[in-house]
């Protein structure tokens, strides 16, 4: 599960959850891949991404290699910033661990890179 | 038993490990899936040359997702069968995968995606036929008690469809579309699906490609978020355009081939004279030609 996906995941399908975002991450195994850099795509995603949630996720994973804490002005033309964003959004992958609902504490396990978002009958 | 796979078992049982592997190795299946995926992306009407963030609903083993990657998009896939997702992982698809039940709603933030496709998955969403469930419930009861609770899925297909469509509507950005290729069982199923989609706020409708061909006919449910818009044109509706799997004029071609081969048609006088020449060249004993060679005989009664 890439951090881009984590950034858009919520637990709002569960009963009793109002926002369900952002999900906490407890990671047991993290992988770093090399992914082709597409500046146009990253620029557009930065508009949709919740930046504080991304920083929090990076922190949870112990990847403190300098993700800037706020989005820089004029980021579309700042290649260095875009490359950093790309690295965190697309190249860091959680392989094993748990995602945690901030309101109920319910855990969604991540196995082999795939989060299990299936809810039990009584939770929906 | 109708033979439709979704009547036999729910998708995560039907697509167990063996079936998942079979599905992804069948080349004809792969070709069909590829064509349908390309057509679905076409119907999405995405801006040209722009990589988009797309959702693949019922992504299975990633066949449709690969088309998205090929066209330069970044995608996330959701499926209920862990066996199918396992095959997708083995095939090292580029998209991120999620194990989830579409009928429970999509767990995504508002406006997260630029579009969604779904190939051959929608018909699985609705139905978990209680009568088939009762047949194998006893067997599975011992294996996984959670399955016995799953019969609740059959209690309200309309509700599951509505939860799915309304969560989809919210996680799509304004102006984007969701295209579903599926195999409708009957018109009331189509009616149920489209009515729940409209209730959830979508506009759009059904596009039927090659409506006059049983083999090539394909159904695409095109849902839009941007308010009322004209539906894209279906393929193969103009009668001059041939559906695939259909070869035109095959009998006419055979006759033309015969006349063009340069030889005399069989049993005519010319053919007989040619044949006698051939025999002489081979050194075989042949009667001389005369005015009686190959003459018309009075018709015999054999």
Image (tube, rainbow, N blue to C red):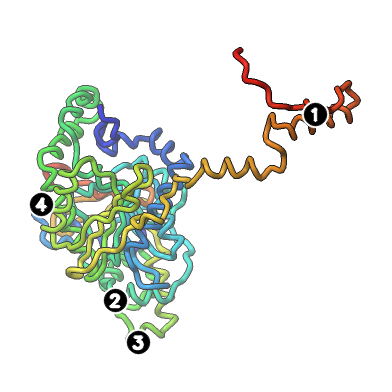
Q: Which residue is mark 2?
A: A47
Q: Nearer the viewer, mark 3 or mark 1?
A: 1
Residue B302 pos. (x, y %): 61, 12
Local secondary structure at mark 1 = loop
> Residue at point 38% right, 83% down?
A76
Q: Which residue is mark 1?
A: B291
> Residue at point 43% right, 76% down?
A39
Q: Nearer the viewer, mark 4 or mark 1?
A: 1
Q: Is residue A115 visible?
A: no
Q: Chain letter of disc 4?
A: A
Q: Quadrant of residue B237?
A: bottom left
Q: Nearer the viewer, mark 2 or mark 1?
A: 1
Q: Which of the labelled discs sits on residue A74, or is there none? A: 3
Mark 2 and mark 1 on one chain: no
Marks 4 and 1 sit apart, C-alpha to C-alpha, by 102 Å
Instruction: Name which of mark 4 and mark 3 comes first in the sequence.
Output: 4
Instruction: Name which of mark 3 and mark 2 comes first in the sequence.
Output: 2
């Amino acid at each position: 599960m890439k951090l881009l996906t984590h950034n858009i995941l919520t637990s709002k399908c569960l009963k009793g959850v109002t926002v369900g975002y952002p999900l906490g991450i407890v990671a047991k195994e993290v992988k770093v891949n090399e992914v082709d850099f597409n500046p146009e795509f990253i620029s557009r995603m930065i508009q949709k991404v919740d930046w504080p949630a991304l920083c929090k996720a990076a922190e949870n994973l112990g990847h403190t290699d300098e993700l800037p804490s706020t989005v820089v002005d004029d980021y579309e033309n700042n290649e260095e910033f875009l490359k950093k964003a790309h690295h965190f959004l697309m190249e860091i992958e959680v392989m094993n661990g748990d995602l945690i609902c901030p309101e109920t504490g319910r855990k969604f396990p991540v196995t082999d890179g795939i989060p299990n978002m299936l809810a039990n009958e009584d939770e929906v | 038993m109708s033979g439709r796979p979704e009547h036999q078992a729910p998708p995560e049982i039907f697509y167990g490990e063996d079936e998942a592997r079979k599905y992804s190795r069948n080349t004809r299946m792969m070709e069909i899936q590829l064509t349908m995926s390309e057509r679905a992306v076409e119907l999405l009407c995405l801006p040209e040359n722009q990589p988009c963030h797309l959702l693949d609903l019922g992504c299975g083993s990633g066949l449709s997702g690969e088309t998205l990657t090929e066209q330069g998009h970044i995608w996330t896939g959701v499926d209920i069968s862990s066996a199918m997702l396992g095959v997708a992982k083995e095939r090292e698809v580029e998209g991120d995968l999620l194990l989830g039940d579409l009928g429970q709603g999509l767990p995504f933030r508002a406006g997260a995606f630029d579009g969604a496709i779904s190939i051959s998955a929608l018909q699985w969403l609705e139905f978990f036929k209680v009568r088939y469930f009762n047949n194998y419930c006893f067997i599975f009861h011992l294996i996984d008690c959670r399955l016995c609770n799953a019969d609740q899925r059959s209690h309200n297909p309309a509700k599951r469809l509505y939860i799915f469509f309304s969560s989809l509507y919210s996680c799509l950005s304004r102006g984007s579309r969701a295209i579903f290729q599926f195999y409708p069982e009957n018109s009331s199923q189509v009616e149920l699906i489209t009515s729940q989609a409209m209730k959830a706020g979508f506009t759009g409708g059904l596009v039927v490609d090659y409506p006059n061909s049983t083999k090539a006919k394909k159904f695409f449910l095109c849902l839009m978020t941007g308010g009322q818009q004209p539906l894209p044109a279906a393929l193969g509706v103009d009668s001059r355009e041939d559906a695939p799997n259909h070869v035109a004029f095959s009998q006419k071609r055979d006759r033309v081939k015969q006349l063009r081969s340069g030889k005399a048609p069989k049993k005519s006088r010319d053919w007989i004279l040619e044949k006698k020449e051939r025999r002489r060249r081979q050194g075989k004993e042949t009667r001389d030609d005369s005015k009686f060679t190959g003459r018309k005989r009075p018709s015999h009664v054999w």
